[in-house]
Image: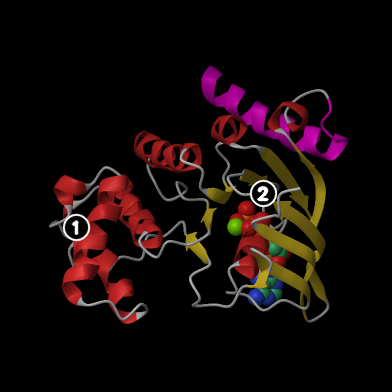
Amino acid sequence: MMAPMLAVRALERRVGDVEILRRIDLDVMPGEAIGVIGPSGSGKSSLLRCIAGLDPISGGTVLVEGRVARPGDGAIGMVFQQFNLWPHLTARENVALALRLVRKMPAAAAQAKAEAALARVGLAALAGRKPAALSGGQQQRVAIARTLAMEPRVLLFDEPTAALDPELTTEVLDVIRDLAQAGTTMLVVSHEMGFIARLSTRVVFLDHGVVVQAAPPAELFGTQAEPRVRGFLQTYLDRVAWARDA
Ligand SMILES: Nc1ncnc2c1ncn2[C@@H]1O[C@H](COP(=O)(O)OP(=O)(O)OP(=O)(O)O)[C@@H](O)[C@H]1O
Ligand SMILES: [Mg+2]
């Protein structure tokens, strides 16, 4: 029996009286891509932030390869909706900075590793550009390269294309799909349902801080969907239909 890469056990997050996450259990096997969907405010970002150690948890454990993950140990990497690149630094320097500051890498080694990471997201030729000279999609790919360069065991994406114009989302989704196909263990929060359905080994549907259903996409997007999941997806389909007919 293979051990999970990521084990979330009875994870809880409360702020005051508000229960944001309620006893979340989730085992993620090496190489799995978990899609996380659910209504606004259901706790998707909170789940990722708690796994990454960015939000304090009120109970439970997060284990990476059987060990408690600690912020800064590099076990988990996260990509956000906002790219947060330094405007005065080139793509290469943006990626190299964390390696130098956090990993204490010498400048030349950090630059070489940054270039390798940029090549993985298809930006080898643009390594010398500053963010202002890059499209939103390219900037997000730099942010993904910055996370990849730290060689995390688990990658978390929180709505990585939500800040992008629709025509720029594809290049970012393609990079995420390539990483998944290369065997990267990942959790992806996205409202791009077609992408989630094709990418995911399993999809988790959150509502009010509870996992309502966790199942392969064929089940969760098919006839075996729980009623609450079905209702959510119907709302989504109605919106798409409206956009198509408009
Ligand atoms: N620091 C906080 N203090 C109090 N409540 C919070 C805090 N952070 C999040 N919440 C609440 O927790 C709930 C879950 O928020 P979260 O951002 O995780 O939802 P989400 O599923 O990512 O939503 P969206 O799809 O809009 O991004 C929301 O009701 C939110 O208002
Ligand atoms: Mg969110």
Most extreme residue toward the front is: 1
Q: Residue at x 49, y 78 (%)?
A: 72
Q: Secondary structure at mark 1?
A: helix
Magenta segment's dominant SS is helix
Q: Is residue 80 visible in this depiction of the protein?
A: yes
Most foreground residue, 134 or 103: 103
Residue 132 is labelled as 1
Residue 193 lies, in percent from the top left, at 60, 34
Residue 113 picture quarter? bottom left
Residue 86 disc label = none
Camera-nearest residue between 153 and 244: 153
Identified at 17% across, 60% down, the residue is: 130
Amino acid type, label 2:
Met
**Which SS class for mark 2?**
loop
Task: Name the residue tied to disc 2.
Answer: 29
Observer-nearest of 155 and 209: 155
Magenta residue span: 224-246
Return the residue found at the far right.
Answer: 227
Residue 246 visible in the displayed image? no
